[in-house]
Image (cartoon, rainbow, N blue to C red):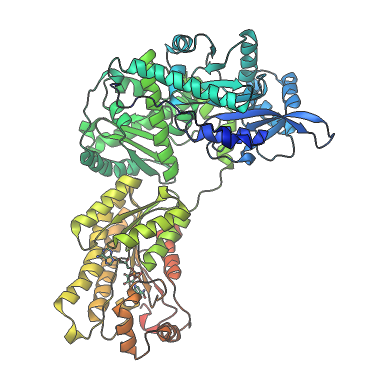
Amino acid sequence: MPQSATPFRIPANRWSAEEAASLTPEGLLLYRSNLLGSDLTVTNFGGGNTSAKLDAKDPLTGETVTALWVKGSGGDIGSMKLDGFSTLYLDKLLGLEKLYRGVAFEDEMVAYLPHCTFGLNPRAASIDTPLHAYLPFAHVDHVHPDAIIALAASTGGEAATREIFGGSVGWLPWKRPGFDLGLTLRDYVAANPGLRGVMLAGHGVICWGDDARACYDNTIDLIAKAAAHLNARLVKGPAFGGEAVPALAPESRAKIAARLAPRLRGLMVGERSKVGHFSDTPETLEFVGSKAFARLAAVGTSCPDHFLRTKIAPLALDPARIDDDAYLAAALVEYRNGYLAYYGRNAGPNDPKVRDPNPVVVLLPGVGQLTFAADKTTARLAGEFYANAINVMRGAEAVGDYVGLPESEAFAIEYWALEEAKLQRMPRPKPLVGKIALVTGGAGGIGAATAARLLSEGACVMLADIDAASLEAKRAELAKVFGGDVTRAVPCDVTDEASVQAAFDLTAREFGGLDILVANAGIASSAPVEETSVALWRKNYDVLAEGYFLASRSAFPLMKLQKTGSIVFIGSKNALAATPNASAYASAKAASLHLARCLALEGAPHGIRVNVVNPDAVIRGSKIWDGDWRKERADAYGVDPGDELEAFYRDRSMLKRNVLPEDIAEAVYFLASDASAKSTGNVVNVDAGNAQAFTR
Ligand code: NAD
C-alpha cells in the first residue's frame, strides 16, 4: 500500500469495439475525445486536445483534400460535440511556415488560422493547432494528466521518462504553446524516429497513433505506466517529507472554514464580490499538513492549465494566527503587493493592465483550502485545479525536485494578448454574480420564486426551510435549471437559535459569506381574539417576529465583514392594515415590519440595507393557502374557499389583478440588488393596490 493518502489512479482502457464499429471517422475522433476527457485521470477539466487528419471533399473543387479536425478553442474534450472541433485545410496550415517570422510574432500566426478554415466552420482554432498540424501522424492526442505533469515538472522527470518508457517517449524542454513549439516538435520527432510520444516539460504529453483506437490505447498506456511508476516511488516513504501538522477533526475544519471564509472575502479588494469554495480532501490535508508545504507552496503551480485558474502562488496562512484580524489583513496586503510586484517585474508597455491581485487559493495546515473567484463554478474549479497541482507536486517530488516555470514564462502566459482577448470577449456578468443569498422558507411559494429570481440574475442561493422533503424537492428543481454549484439547501427552523446559526455558518462555508437575506419563512393563522390561544399567539410571534430577528441577527456579522448587505423581509399587507380575526398573525407581521426599520437604522453605518416587501393574497403556489387559512379567510369574508376566493381578492384589489409569487420575487430582487442601493427602511407593497395599506 502506498503511504501517501492518495496514490495516482491508473486509468482504465474503456474503448468499446462494439460502440466504435458503427462510427464515421470524425465520429471516432469524437468518441475517443469524450472517452479521454470524461476520465479525470486522463485530463483535467477543459484541458487537452485531440485531432485527426481526415480526407474530405473540397466544396470548391470537388477534389479530395486533407482536413485537420482539432479540438477548437474553449470547451472540454469530455463533453464536447462534433461542433467543438475546428476544421482546417492541412496544406494551408503547413504553408503558414513560410509566413512565420519567429517567436516574437507568435500572435500574428493565430490571426492566420481562420484563413485556413475548411468548410466554413465557425469554431475558432486553438493555439495548440500547430502542434497537431505539424506532426506527421493521422491521430494525435495532447493531454495533461497529473501523473504526466508530475514527470514534466520534476528535475528527475527526464530520467524517469527514459526509465519508464525505455527511450520510446522523447523529452522537449519547456516552450510556450504556439507555432514555434509546433515546428520544434516536428523537427524533434523527425530526428528521433520510432517515438510513441513526447513529454513537453512543464506542460504535458503529446502522442499519436495510426488510427483512433491505436492513438487512444497509446495515451492510456502512457498515463498508466507513468502513474504506476510514481506509485511505486511513493510507497517508499511518506509524501512531502511526512506530516508536520495533523488534520483537525472534520467538524473543526468546517467550523474554521465557516469563520475564516467571510473574513477573507471581506478583506479582498475589487469591484465585485467573490464567491468562495472550501475543500478538505485527503490529498489537500496531506499537502497542507506536510513538512514540505511551505517550500512547495512558494514554488507555485507549474502547468499553464493550472495557474491560469489558481494564480501562480497560493496564500499560505498560519493556523495559529487566523483569529487575529490584523494578521489576516496584513497577509492579504502582502499577497497583493507580491502580485503587483510580479506584474511590475515582468510587464512591458504593451501588456494588458494588471488584473485582480487577490489570492485565488488560500491554504491552511490542518484545515484545507479555500478558493475564491468571481462565481461559484470558477471557485470550485480553481480548487480542483489546485488539487491537480498538489498531485503534480507529490509525484514530482517522488522522482526528483518539483520545479515551477520561470517567472517570466508564467507571466507571458498569464498576460498573453490571446488570453486577454478571451477575457475581453466574455459577456458582462449578470447583476448578482458574486452575490450570496439565504432565503428562509425557501421551499415555499414566495421563497422558491424569490430564489429562482435571484439565481436567474447570477446569485448563489441557500434555501432554508423546516420542511425537509419540500426543501430537497425545490433544491433539485432549481439546481436543474441553474446548476448545483449555486443552489444549496439546509433544513432549518427559524424559531431555533442554534438551527438558524448553523444555516448561516453553512452558507459562509459553502459560498464564502452572505450578501442578501430574504426573511420569508412564515405561517398564517386565523382566529377571533377570544379563541386565540397563547400557543397560537406565540407560534405566530415565534416564526414571524422572533424568526426574522434570529435570521437578521445571524446575517449582521457576516454582512458587516463585507461592509454591505441587503436584508429583505417578506411582511404582509396585514402589517399595515388591520384585519378581522387574525390578530396574532397581523400584529406579529407588524412587529417584524418595525423590526426592519430598527435594523435599517442599525445597519446603515455598515452599509446594510433593510427593506420590506408586503404581499397580499398570493394564493397560487403558496402552501399557506393550501391549509386552514384558506377556509378561515373565506369564512371571515363570507365567500366560497374554492375559485371564489381568488376572485374575491382580485376584485378587492384596486388594480383588479391576481398577485403571484413571481410578483413578490421581482420586488425582492429590486431591493436585494444595487438597483435600490440608496433605499433602506422602505416598504414596497405588492398587493395589486390596497388603499388601507398605503404607507404614510
Ligand atoms: P408557503 O407556506 O408556501 O411558504 C412558507 C414556507 O415557510 C414554507 O415552506 C414553510 O415550510 C416555511 N416555514 C414555516 N415555518 C418555518 C420555520 N419555523 N422555519 C423555517 N421555515 C418555516 O407560504 P408563502 O405564501 O410562500 O409565504 C411566504 C411569506 O409570505 C410568509 O412570511 C407569509 O406570511 C408571507 N405572506 C404571504 C401572503 C400570501 O398571500 N401567500 C400574503 C402576505 C404575506
Where is residue 550 shown, x and y percent of the image? 23, 60
- Can residue 420 be seen in the rendering of this structure? no
Residue 695 location in percent, x, y? 36, 77
Q: From the viewer's perspective, is residue 388 above or below residue 502?
A: above
Does residue 41 appear anywhere in the picture?
Answer: yes
For the residue pair 569 and 448, the one nearer the viewer reads as 448
Instruction: Give me the residue at 38% from left, 60% from top.
Output: 474
Q: Nearer the viewer, residue 407 or 502?
A: 502
Location of residue 337 by image quarter: top left
Horizontal relation, residue 363 to residue 12: left or right: left
Compared to 61, does 671 lie above or below? below
Would residue 552 be found to the left or right of residue 197 on screen?
left
Residue occupying the far front of the picture = 18
Q: Is residue 262 left or right of residue 101?
A: left
- Percent across and percent down for residue 357 are 42, 34
Q: Position of residue 383 (x, y in %)?
A: 39, 35
Residue at the far left: name it: 534
Give the quarter of the figure containing the C terminus: bottom left
**Closest to the observer: 313 or 649?**
649
Q: Residue at x 60, y 34 (%)?
A: 20
In which image quadrant can residue 451 be found? bottom left
In this picture, is 647 found above or below 311? below
Outermost right residue: 61
The N terminus lies in quadrant: top left
